[in-house]
Image (spheres, rainbow, N blue to C red):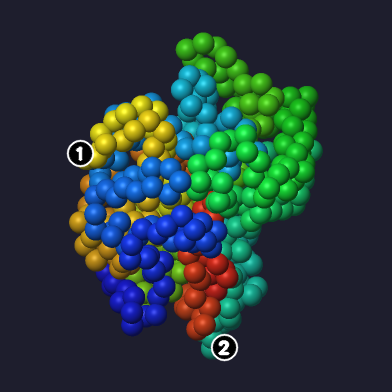
Amino acid sequence: MGKIDNVAANLPVRVPLHSTPMGIWGSFRAGRRNVLELIPEIATRAPILSGTTGKRWHMLMDPDGLRHVLRDAVDNYPKSMVTKLILGPAIGNSLFVAEGAEWLWQRRTAAPVFSHRNIAALAPVMTAAATRAADRFAAAAGSGASGGRAIDAFDEMVTATFEVIADVTLSGGEGFDRASVHKAIEDYIGQTARLSMLDILGAPAWVPRPGRMFSAATMRQMKQTADQAILSRKTRGPSPVPDLLDLLLAGEDPATGRRMTVDELRDNLLTFIVAGHETTALTLAWSLYLCAFDPAVQDAARAEAQAALGDRGATTADIPRMPLIRRIVDEALRLYPPAAFLARTAQKADTLLGREVRAQDTVILPIYALHRHHALWQNPDGFDPARFLTAPQRFSYLPFGDGPRICIGASFALQEAVIILATLLARFRYGPVPGKDPKPVMILTLRPQGGVWLAVERV
């Protein structure tokens, strides 16, 4: 497979990381601009870094150390208070942020919802969204004779994946205003899910963060919309084809028989809605962007998709026949992981790679640096889907985390990404748009500032 020469192609494959860890005020300014700018360049070569920025911190890039934090000693490293402060207003104490026994019973209850059988049953929704996206591309794209026309692939992929998550969570649609929920999510991420100076200083949770207070009304509206949808479903009964809400309503903890209350259902439903479209849209947009800079990979993927699909949209049954497209998704997740910067808080003293960790130290997991680490990846900044012909070292590739708290929706996201990407690669050719390079910016997820503009033409 072809590889991108990221200098010759003028591809902004990576954020320019700084040469040394910064002081507190430099960290604050960088974090407000782009959380990735908190990562020093040496993080792509060192196993661990430590320092103090208001609080003691350790930045961990070693697979053995990551295994310890994410699996072996997971109870000692819950999600950081910063994570809970940012996400709590939107998703409460849901599966994503809950800890200990509260997390465990929710995980046991929700796990059957994301079984292989249930995910496969939801695939027709993904195929329909992929086909609608292709129709929109066809209406906007040029022909081979006229040349490709510029389309913001990220905006289009957000539309497609929100259609999917709206249909698989609330298929009936009663009491569910898609436009208002979508706008509330976008406003929340744009206004609220940013690093605060108080977070960097380690201020306690009870100290108000003004930006998060500003969005309280938006959050209330979003929760009210979800509550109405849940109550409506309870009244009218399940859908003909069970969706995620039906499955959650029917779910119970196999160990205790406990079922979710309306508040718990709402918080978890909003978790799936917020996380379930943004991350997959990013993966798809970056996948198309990378293909635009590598015609050899793009042509091979198109041939694979056309051979499997002909003129129709992709289905879950087609996925085994499109291994290259799956590898493109994997490589996009390596270069541009949506969850590119994670943090944990040590509860008691520990040792990481011989480094002393004290209680309340912050342990940063810079997935962006891990995925470009020179000791773990050959040509770490290059686009090379062929690297996934062999499985990467465990805990060196963490687009969905790992251990007991690995993302519960990983299989759902991968199925959706391959179905939509294959459908779009089969029908269109993609090229770069000069002067429209996106800048990877980490706010809550790794977003392309300015959009992902591609020249798209029908084939």
Query: x, y percentage for residue 186?
Result: 66, 54
Q: In this view, does 250 lie to the left or right of 369?
A: right
The amino acid type found where label 1 is placed reads Gly
The amino acid type found where label 2 is placed reads Ser
Residue 221 occupies quadrant: top right
Residue shown at 30%/68% (left/top)? 382
Toward the top, the furthest residue is 256
Residue 160 occupies quadrant: bottom right
Using the image, determine if residue 223 lies above or below residue 255: below
Query: x, y percentage for residue 266?
Result: 67, 32
Q: Residues within 10 Å of mark 2 (few under 14, many from 20)?
A: few
Query: x, y percentage for residue 353?
Result: 21, 40
| Viewer can see residue 185 | no
Q: Is residue 342 left or right of residue 110?
A: left
Q: How crowded is mark 1: few (under 14 residues within 10 Å), some or many (20 or more)?
A: few
User: Which mark is on residue 354?
Assistant: 1
Using the image, determine if residue 417 lies above or below residue 140: above
Using the image, determine if residue 451 lies above or below residue 119: below
Mark 2 or 1, nearer chain start: 2
User: Which mark is on residue 394?
Assistant: none
Q: Is residue 154 left or right of residue 404?
A: right
Q: What is the C-alpha distance between the residues marked 2 and 1?
A: 61 Å
Q: Where does label 2 land, which residue? A: 146
Q: In this view, does 170 lie to the left or right of 10?
A: right
Quarter holding the N terminus is bottom left
